[in-house]
Image: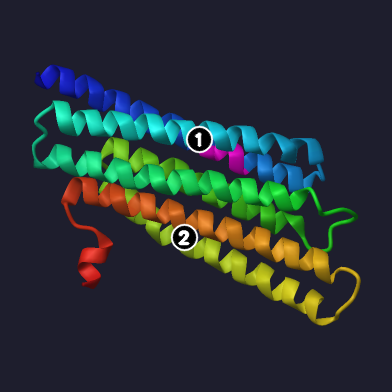
Amino acid sequence: MRDRFTGQLKSLHKGLIEMGEQCESVITMATDALINNNKAGAESVSVLDTDIDHQERDIESLCLKLLLQQQPVASDLRQISAALKMITDMERIGDQAADIAELVKYIDGDPIINMTKIGDMAKHVIYMVTESVNAYVKKDVTLAQNIIKYDDEVDDLFNEMKNEIIDIIAKKNDDAEKAVDLLMIAKYLERIGDHATNIAEWAVFSVTGVHKSDELS
């Protein structure tokens, strides 16, 4: 019975890694579409987002089977419950990447801000998503805690972009509408960083049994 459970747990880990990889791909595709003004690329993002939705349902189903058909001990229960929370955050990451792609469809013309910062934000949040899932699979609390701290870098980049964009909006020129769209895109990337932080916090919980929300209560 335990061997079967261990095998299903490995399947769960594999599914989470694959879902994390899909999140990386959808963020990359959405931001590349923006930076390269690739409307066709933006259209393709919704397909990947749908795949992420399907993966969420598959992993949720596997978690429920593990809970109902097996007899998990306390540490197993933490892993399963953490996985259920993580896939919710990953599904939302897919949604927010799709929201970015939707805005890209309406942005035309030359860039009005330094797109390097958008690219940097995307790289940072992709790293956070990847390593937060790895922290869960490897039961690496130190890695998870480092990812939680890393979110400050994403927040700093967002604040830099926000200030730059607000200056453009304040001038009330023809670029103001585009600036608002870019501010929304930056905000979506900042939220993706927050979701990656949530995943890392659940990775910590899966090992220690302590979640950040418990420390605040």
Q: Residue at x 17, y 23 (%)?
A: 5
Of 200 and 95, nearer the camera is 95
Instruction: Check disc 2 and report the residue beneath it.
Output: 151
Instruction: Name above or below for residue 11 compared with residue 126.
Output: above
Q: Earlier in the sequence, mark 2 or mark 1?
A: 1
Q: Residue at x 87, y 53 (%)?
A: 108
Residue 63 drawn at (x, y percent): 27, 33
- Residue 132 in view (yes/no): no
Circle 1 Cα neighbour tier, 10 Å, few/some/many (<14 / 14–19 / ≥20): many
Contact? badges 2 and 1 (CB < 8 Å):
no
* 91 left or right of 16 in image: right
The quarter in which the C terminus is drawn is bottom left
In which quarter of the view is residue 211 placed? bottom left
Q: Amino acid at mark 2?
A: Asp
Q: Which residue is mark 1?
A: 52
Horizontally, residue 31 falls left or right of residue 208, namely: right
Coloring scheme used:
rainbow
User: Is residue 161 inside the magenta stretch?
Assistant: no
Q: In what element is the residue under mark 1?
A: helix
Q: Which residues are magenta?
A: 23-27
Image depth: mark 2 or mark 1 in front: 1
